[in-house]
Image (spheres, grey):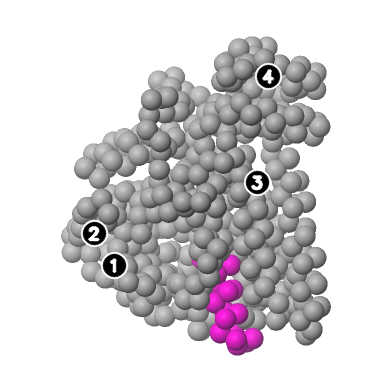
Amino acid sequence: MTAATEIAFENTFVRDLDGLYLPWQAAPAPDARLVLLNESLAGELGLDPAQLRTPEGVALLTGTTVPDSATTVAQAYAGHQFGNYSPRLGDGRALLVGELVTPDGARRDLHLKGSGRTPFARGGDGRAPLGPMLREYVISEAMHALGVPSTRSLAVVATGEPVLRDRGPEPGAVLARTAASHLRVGTFQFAAATGEVDVLRRLAEYAIARHHPQASSPLELYRAVIAVQAGLVARWMQIGFVHGVMNTDNMTISGETIDYGPCAFLDAHDPATWYSSIDSGGRYAYGNQPGIAQWNLARLGESLLGLFADSQEEAVRLATEELAGFADAYLAARDRGYLAKIGVGTPELLADLFAVIEDQKPDHTLFFRRLSEAARGDAGPVRALLSDPAALDPWLESWRAAGPDADAMDRVNPVYVPRNHLVEEALGAAVEGDLEPVQWLLQVLADPFTERAGYERYAQPAGPDSPPFTTFCGT
C-alpha cells in the first residue's frame, strides 16, 4: 500500500506552461479534520481511500504536506466578470497540486480550493467556508450522476480555522476537486495579454494535446471548444441548471462544468430565473446561458486571433465564421436532448412545448418526469402542475400520436435533482456539526433516475410559502 506521501503526480502544466502560474504553498490547517471523502472517486483515480484518511492523506488534501512528485502552483488567468474585464485574476485561494494518471490512462488535475492566500488573492483571505465547499461537493457529484461533464469532488476537509464572511464567522474548509484540467477561457485571455505569441502558442498546443487531439491547428481547437461548450450548456438547460456566475474564467476548454458558487436548479420553468446575490441584473439568468456562452466564446476567439492567420482581417473572418456555428450546434444539442426527454423523434413538437411551459411555468423536473406517466395513459399528474391544465392538452394530443417511449423517458428525466431548499437545509445542518442530511442527500442524488419509496420529499420543490431563494458566492 503506497503512502499518501508517495503518490506519483505528474506536472505537465508546470513543465510546459512557464509564465502561466506561480509556485506557491498552502497555508497551515491548524486542526484539519476530514469531513467527506469520495471513496468511489478515489478508487477511479487509483488512490487508496484508507491512506487518504490517515494524517498524511488529510495533509495532502489540504496541501500542507505533498509528495515530492507534486509541484503546487497558483494558476494565472484573466477574465470578464459580469462583462467587465480583469487582466489578472488567477487562483487567489486555490492551488494545483499536480496531475494524476488514472488506471484507465486518463489525466486528472488535483486542485485545492480554500488553501490560503496566493499572490492572486486580490485582497481576499484565501480561505473558504465549509458550507460553500460542501455545496460544490454535493452539486458537482449530482451533475456527474446526471451525466453532465463536470469537475468532481474528492474530499472536503475542515481546517479548524474560522473564516469571516458577511454572515459572521464560519468554519473554514478546503475542497479537493479533480478535473480534466483547469484551463479556462480566462487562461487564454491572460496568455494573449502577455503579448508573447510563444506563450499563447504553447498554451494552444497544450490544450490540443490534452483535450482535443483531433484538432490540427488553433482554429480547429477553437472549433472543438465551441462544440463541447454548446453541448454542455444544452445539458444545463435540459436539467434546469443555473450556473450563476458564467464569467470567462469559469468556462473550461475541456467542456466540463466548473466552479459551483451561486449555482442552483430551477423549480418553476422560467427563463428569467436567477438566484445569485451578486447578479443584480440577472445577466446569468437561466434563459441567458446559451447567449452568454457564445459571448464568452467570442472572447476566446479574440484571444486566439494571433494564431489564426498572419492578417488580422483574415483572423477575424475565420474566428467569426467558427463562432457563427455555435448557435446551430447548441440548438441541435438542445433539441436532441429534449426529444429524448419527451420520448419521440418529432422536432416539430418542441416549439409548442417550449411555449406552453414558458407560459405556465410548471416545476421543470417534475414536468418532464410526469410526462412519462402521460405516455402510459395518465395525464393527470403532469396536467396538475399547470395553472391552466387545458393549455397543455393540444400538445399532449399531438405528442401521444407520435408514440412516446415512456421507459426511455424515465432513463433521461431525473426524479431527483439538488433541490435548492434541501441543499440549504443540509448545508446548514453540516455547518452546525450534523452531516447526516448531507450524506442522505448525496445518497439520493447518486441515483437520480430511479424513483424510490420513502424519498418523496427529495423529489418535491419548496412549498408555496417558502421565502425567495438566493445563493451566495462564498468567496
Secondary element at image label 4: helix
- Tell me, for residue 125, which label it has, or none: 1
- Whether the residues at callouts 1 and 3 have beta carbons within 8 Å, the answer is no
According to the picture, the residue beneath numbered tag 3 turns out to be: 234
Q: Mark 2 = which residue?
A: 163
Magenta residues span 180-199
User: Is any atom of residue 250 visible in this view?
Assistant: no
Residue at screen point 57% across, 51% down = 149
Q: Earlier in the sequence, mark 4 or mark 2?
A: 2
Q: How far separated are the C-alphas under marks 1 and 2?
A: 8 Å
Q: CA distance from mark 3 to mark 4?
A: 26 Å
Foreground: disc 3 or disc 4? 4
Disc 4 designates what residue?
Answer: 391
Say what secondary structure mark 3 lies in: helix
Rendered position, 402 above or below 222: above
What amino acid does circle 2 point to?
Answer: Val
Mark 3 packing: few (<14 Cα in 10 Å), some, or many (20+)?
Answer: many
User: Going from the N terminus, do you reach mark 3 or mark 2 first?
Assistant: 2
Q: Amino acid at mark 1?
A: Asp
Q: CA distance from mark 3 to mark 2?
A: 36 Å
Q: Any magenta on residue 183?
A: yes
> Residue at coordinates 69% horizontally, 33% vertically from top-left?
354
- Alpha carbon distance from label 1 to label 4: 53 Å
* Mark 1 vs 2: CB contact within 8 A: yes
| Quarter occupied by residue 299 | bottom right
Which of disc 3 and disc 1 is earlier in sequence?
1
Q: Assess whether residue 409 is covered by the magenta stretch.
A: no
In this rendering, position of residue 446 left or right of residue 431: right
